[in-house]
Image (spheres, helix red, strand yellow):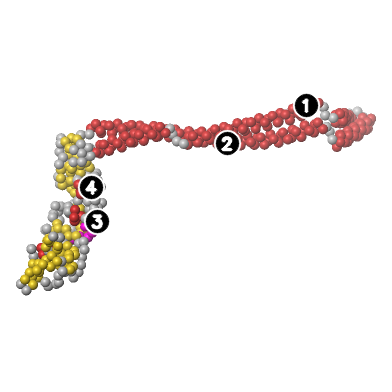
Amino acid sequence: ELYFREAGRVKKVYVERDDMVKEGDLLAELENDDLVRQLNQAEIELETARLKLQEAEEQQQRQIDKAKIDLEIKELDLANMKEDLDSLALDVKLAKIDLKDTKAGPSPEEIAIARHNLEKAKNSLWSSQVHRDSTCGQTRGAACDSAEASVNRAEEDVRIAEIHLQELLKGPSEDDIAVAEAKYEKTLQRKRQKERDIEIQERRIALARMDLETLEKGVDPNLTKAVERNELAVERLEAKVADTRVESPIDGKVTSVSAYEGRTLNAYQTVFIVADEAELEITAEPMSSQLQRLSEGLSAAIILSDYPGKELPAEIVQLPYPYGRGGGAEIEEADKLTHISFDPQDLAIEPGDLVKVIVTLEEKEDALWLPPAAIRTFAGRKFVVVEEEGRQRRVDVTLGIESSERVEITEGLEEGQVVLGQ
């Protein structure tokens, strides 16, 4: 049984009685043009919000990629600075040693070496002079000029050796110490500056990491919320539009149509019945006293009016509330019925055929029984009228299993006795 979930005026009916429909086919709709326009507008706004969110996410991803590259560059620069710092630390040590050596002056070994070099230069000068005198005493020429040049060079070497020895003997000058100190201070200052540069770079890296972490947290939450709001608006309007439409939930045949164009209908008023004739079941409305004795899953037997001698097995699959799972406080009409499944086998059965349903609640063999018409009741007593040798007498009985055709007698009678019916 199908219905609109909103009250309104029927705009269009798309099917007729006995039409075959598929699951999801639109059967009819109410006048809903304004709702459809609202839905279209909401879908446009949703698409716009999604595009803005997508653009923001793409832009943010570009910023994240850029921030990662920038962080890597800063970390490489920091590594280079640390290598430079190690080199400067070595330069500071060397400058400090050089300053210490300059202030301490020449060692005895250096002075001894200088004296040795001076004596060596003098001996070389003496040898050059002897060679010149020997060469130039015999003749004047190229050989003499060469020997004279050798003497001049040897004299220059002697003067240099003497000056070097004198400087060593005098010790370091104030200028030498000042130069060494200036070199040390300059190198130390460069090292300190590099340390400050490293500290600044480390803070820049920390800021770059913070920026990257902020970017990785996601886009502006307002953009995401805008999409969610528009999705909810679309869902709400889709639900409203769906309430003005009736679609078939199954494949089947339209067996009833009570809607037509222009008719005003109330919400939840049945307008179509679609039946899946491939899946037949029996519905019944037992009395409450019967329902109290039934339960879902009980086996049953059915006898069709068109096949009186044929009995088919069946099963109770659903009882109405509160006896079974057929809905709750607010239930549909179909949930108020008892549903019984069965196998039609090869019989030609049509919707609407009548059947008799027999549910076996209890069963006994070799039971003593009477038809219900033989049982009489008076003042709460259950008794029967027995005929013996032409006379009648009342006999109290205790009943067992009772059905519409037979009643079990557990006490009061014996097999073979003659009981009079009412």
The crowd level at tag 2 (other Cα within 10 Å; few <14, some 14-19, many 20+) is some
CA distance for labels 1 and 4 = 104 Å
Q: Amino acid at mark 2?
A: Glu
Q: Residue furthest bottom?
A: 389
Tell me if residue 15 is in the magenta stretch: no
Instruction: Work out whether residue 179 or residue 352 is closer to the camera in this orientation and state it.
Output: 352
Residue underneath mark 1 = 178
Mark closest to the chain's N terminus, 2 or 1: 2
SS majority, magenta: loop
Q: Secondary structure at mark 1?
A: helix
The crowd level at tag 4 (other Cα within 10 Å; few <14, some 14-19, many 20+) is some
Mark closest to the chain's N terminus, 2 or 4: 2
CA distance for labels 3 and 4 = 25 Å
Which residues, given as a range, are shown in magenta? 293-301
User: Visible in this render: residue 398?
Assistant: yes
CA distance for labels 2 and 4 = 65 Å
**Residue 353 horizontal side relative to residue 169, left or right:** left
Q: Residue 75 got which mark?
A: 2
Label 1 close to label 4 by CB (< 8 Å): no
Mark closest to the chain's N terminus, 3 or 4: 4
Q: Residue furthest top?
A: 175
Tell me if residue 300 is in the magenta stretch: yes
Which of the two discs, 1 and 4, sits closer to the camera? Answer: 4
Q: Secondary structure at mark 2?
A: helix
Q: Amino acid at mark 3?
A: Glu
**Residue 312 horizontal side relative to residue 239, left or right:** left
Residue underneath mark 4 = 250
Quadrant containing the C terminus in the rendered view:
bottom left
Residue underneath mark 3 = 296
Q: In the image, residue 351 lies at what x, y percent?
A: 15, 52
CA distance for labels 3 and 2 = 74 Å
